[in-house]
Image (cartoon, coloured by chain):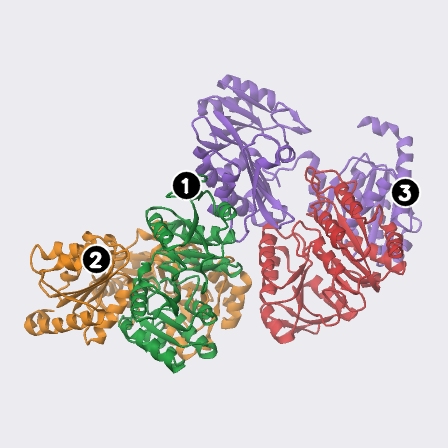
Chain colours: A red, B green, C orange, D purple
Amino acid sequence: MSVLLGRDTRVLIQGLGREGSFHAARMKDYGTAVVGATKPGKGGTTQDGIPLFDTVAQAVAATGANASLIFVPAPGAADAMLEAIDAGVELVVTITEGIPVQDMLKVAAVLETSATTLIGPNCPGAITPGECKIGIMPAENFRPGGIGFVSRSGTLTYEIADLLSQAGLGQSTCIGIGGDPVIGLPTPDAVRLLNEDPATEAIVIVGEIGGSAEEHAAEYLRAQGKKPAVAFIAGRSAPPGKRMGHAGAIVSGNQGTAQSKVKAFEEAGIPVASAPSQIPRLVREALARR
Amino acid sequence: MSVLLGRDTRVLIQGLGREGSFHAARMKDYGTAVVGATKPGKGGTTQDGIPLFDTVAQAVAATGANASLIFVPAPGAADAMLEAIDAGVELVVTITEGIPVQDMLKVAAVLETSATTLIGPNCPGAITPGECKIGIMPAENFRPGGIGFVSRSGTLTYEIADLLSQAGLGQSTCIGIGGDPVIGLPTPDAVRLLNEDPATEAIVIVGEIGGSAEEHAAEYLRAQGKKPAVAFIAGRSAPPGKRMGHAGAIVSGNQGTAQSKVKAFEEAGIPVASAPSQIPRLVREALARR
Amino acid sequence: MKLHEYQAKQVLSRAGIPIPDGRLATSPEEAESAAKAIGAAVAVKAQVQVGGRGKAGGIKVTKTPAEAREAAKAILGMDLKGLRVDKVYVERAANVAAELYLGITLDRDRRRPVVMLSTVGGMDIEEVAASTPERIARGWPSPLLGLLPFAARALAFEARVPEPQRDAVVDIAQRLFAVYRSTDAMLVEINPLFVQKDGSVLAGDAKLDIDDNALFRQKELAALKEVSKDEEAEEKARALGFSYVQLDGDVGIIGNGAGLVMGTLDAVRNAGGRAANFLDVGGGAKEAVVKAALEIVLANQRVKSVLINIFGGITRGDEVAKGILAVTAQHPPRVPLVIRLSGTEAAAGRKLLEGAPLVSKETMDDAAREAVRLAAEGRVKAPATRVKR
Amino acid sequence: MKLHEYQAKQVLSRAGIPIPDGRLATSPEEAESAAKAIGAAVAVKAQVQVGGRGKAGGIKVTKTPAEAREAAKAILGMDLKGLRVDKVYVERAANVAAELYLGITLDRDRRRPVVMLSTVGGMDIEEVAASTPERIARGWPSPLLGLLPFAARALAFEARVPEPQRDAVVDIAQRLFAVYRSTDAMLVEINPLFVQKDGSVLAGDAKLDIDDNALFRQKELAALKEVSKDEEAEEKARALGFSYVQLDGDVGIIGNGAGLVMGTLDAVRNAGGRAANFLDVGGGAKEAVVKAALEIVLANQRVKSVLINIFGGITRGDEVAKGILAVTAQHPPRVPLVIRLSGTEAAAGRKLLEGAPLVSKETMDDAAREAVRLAAEGRVKAPATRVKR
């Protein structure tokens, strides 16, 4: 185990619909312990060999689940997260896209006084290659290794993981933190986890326009960084005021520009790739400079 | 200093009206450091020699106040408490009577995640005799000493403190926790403070009908009591379903009876006085048995 | 402040909780036309705030409007546990398949609301709690978050609400919690919550008890307040700024501070007597309040002696004395007064009372004993008064 | 989703926030009768969602109904920063003594709403923040507690709102926070918040931007949605289940995943070109979606080449290939296509595309360079198209 998830992680699925079932099967193929799922009213039965429960609390009590993966559609997703937090689930990963901001503000407020870590929403999930996958990422792009990888983007994560893996740079844990404006584990918090993780040798940060999470991560690494880091910012060519697919990817006035983020990383001595293809080389160079 | 308040306590008054002004003066006479008061719109002026501030945060920043005494009328009292909690005030004492329960539930929920201790509402306040008084109790009934005293009632507190003082049993700290159904420092929590307090030699608990706080305090002392305790329960002759003056003093069905409370204390080996006049003798006997 | 069933149901209905079609009636004729308008079998229900109305004959189910009229005639004017029935609620009779319980009240220990749901409905929840506690599911929602959907669902699963009703009950629970919050309720209860034979769910009865401290902001509900004869003295006292509760003994009590007054009641009992009332004049009571308090106590014809127990803090002994003199100066009190005056300005008070027709004692216990003794004497002297009751 | 000023003001007014008397008009005649009904000097205000309407001539203050008609005639049909004005709001002119600012939006870093209050009103708050940041008071209410009275008061003191207006501003701030929550707002802003010469306070302008993700539960507001010509393609894409944003370059872009598409845009810029759009087909796009996406991109006449960048995860390369073939099979595309297909079923996809009229590249960078090169060729070949714009 690197951070957040590993061999001891026991995963519950909330929302075992078409998408949930498909990915639960892929996760089991990968060796992830999928110990149960919630389907209100179906408690006591099974689906695809997965035991079903009426509530998260019952599922946790019966299975010892310490993580939950949420596919519940947007209108009920916040309630699903609050249920998992209430049941004391340590790690909650929310794939669902399109959750209202006010719902996430409520979830974030409850998170503050809980012991739960939330990844997402609107994210691909997280993977500790070779040990545990909680999410929808194609596992074949990831290899075990020492690169801790944080990303606000989904497909770009797969692309860059593939580039890293092909370059022989395996990953300790990859965390797809999600593309929404309010997320459970913002870039600086995810970076902090990897910075403190003994299994992580170098950190790759994939940010995008919108917000100032990358600036804060850069500040943190400038002050307390223990290992080399490389960054990439997507959306450098995006015009202000336009939402680029992700609800959180928007430049508002002079806030959230790629320029500001690139500058912050550069001032922290962290090289910024101008294309994903440059990342493996920059990581190698950074590791060599140590 | 025994518990909660002592020579280092710096008190702010919220609600410096007629009643607030009167008691602020009595507190100053007693030697309590009354360092300021809030009166929105009057910030920067003084009243009776007390500097006024627009907000609690400003007052705390300017005076280093670590306690607050609230006289704000019921409709605004919860807001006043939330303001004090928000400003990080360590000890908040609310005298105000008649605060809606739903307001207090909100305050209690916020208290859970704060470092503030709230005494009251609907209480006479607390006093560490000879050091500091925060409240409306007539100070002349109290003497410094080793009896920690917790009471849900006001006048009865004065009466019993007077009996104790006349019997040569001075008090470490007296806490009038208030007569409402939802209060900041319920009996068990107040008892715990005194049980852990090196300056307290024996504990006097004055309860009354309603709720089950006395039962929980008895359970706690049975398991972890370090010093002798004596109890008195007011309202043994009150009929069920009738509210006895205090909003919290009501027997509902078989809940909150004096019998249940007396039984709990007796089972914990704690003598229960059947009249306040018996308390000094019972305390003496309990101290002698040690 | 307790609402009548028909008022509580109106509040629930506005919050989207299904209730049977119903109408209020204050005469047999109104009940008949209500039944006609409803056009089905109806229940005629006494609108008084006591438990067990049904068993006491306060509810009758009738098939025709004429029967409804007769039922209303029987119920209106009835005395139900000391309360006179002056209105009935005529309500479409439910086609009951099962009865559930749903209620929300305050859990003082947890300092949270507690929501209770049970498939054992239609009986006193305290009895259910005593006999089959495992049949009651409980949840404690955060007052900041309310009853979240998952928590309402969990309650329904725990209580084993049958599947066909589960969604409806979950929905009603959330709506009821919204009522609990928006009305500043101390208690809101649907008991029974009917499951009808067609599977639908609706409120069979409804209780709503509003926090008196919140009436200042619940103006619409506060306007529904009705004062029963029993409570008139209590209401009058409240208006005068003090707290009075009628009890059934013969020693009248006046004191300052709820705890001290409760202690005084207990002292009377310790001395073998019974208090006629609880009366707390409050902190810092002035002459006029003390006078009014004494008058209210003396107005209770059961009272055979009055015990005044004041421990002066903010309350001043001289003000108390003046209040007493204001009453006794007019004419000698009809029963003996015992006073125990201590604390602030007690000496001044005692001095003022010198020569007044009352007994002064040093301690609460002595004063209680004396008042009990005098009441006993009074009972012997005036047995006629007892018979009159 | 942004509301017009008149719509936003209606929402504020319903929440108890004072607004000037006003009426909507879509013709000069309607504007005239609106002014007549108001019976005072009015402002005639273009209802388009752009900043700086006033400076651009979109607001005129008039004294008489006839003047209002003339003003409306001038403003209606006007082009304001690319948007045609087709309604005006006729509003009683305020008697302005001072202008404040009050706004609530999301603070992403704190994961809380931020309430901003300033006595520097009537100008862009970002400019105020840049020039005199100390003039903006900020508060971050807990989403569970809302804007508590003490916190609203603290803001008013910090912003130095003059004493005569303080209570009104504190009240409006709390009401505005209720609007923020109840409407699922991303932004709600009153700028300026007028202080009139008589001391009263009212909303001079109002902005309300609703969270698109919350429109499913904001049905009443969602019904107000208007799609401008510029946004038509974006709306059409949304209806088809993918995300499209029109940009001003000539390299059409299709990809899967917002980050990858942003990265592709950047790769095009790295290669010296400019993207014509952002288009994310989403995860697991099937043939039909890819076909529709390609059609939308090709419908943009500025497009000189199209770059399709797919990193297959859930999305399958063969489905993408089928979608492309469904378009190219009908008739050869009007501009060259470049594709980079990687990940799940990429080989199958590439096989299907063999012989199709497109260029396939191994990497994103190579594909971007090729697409940029082809777009440049297209510009040379067809300069006429550019002139036509």
Q: Is D279 positioned to the left or the right of D194 in the image? A: right
Residue in the foreground of this view, choosing between D157 and A20: D157
Q: Which residue is mark 2?
A: C317
Query: Residue D259, position in %: x, y?
Result: 77, 49
Query: Residue A232, position in %: x, y?
Result: 80, 49
Residue in the foreground of this view, choosing between C159 and D302: C159
> Is A24 rendered above or below residue A122?
below
> Is C17 rendered above or below residue B225?
above
Query: Residue C125, position in %: x, y?
Result: 39, 72
Residue in the foreground of this view, choosing between B70 and A173: B70
Marks 2 and 1, how far apart at CA: 33 Å
Residue in the foreground of this view, choosing between B247 and C182: B247
Q: Give residue B46's mark.
A: 1
Q: Which image quadrant: the N terminus of chain C? A: bottom left
Question: Identity of the amino acid at label 2?
Answer: Gly
Q: Residue D185's image quarter? A: top right
Q: Which residue is mark 3?
A: D369
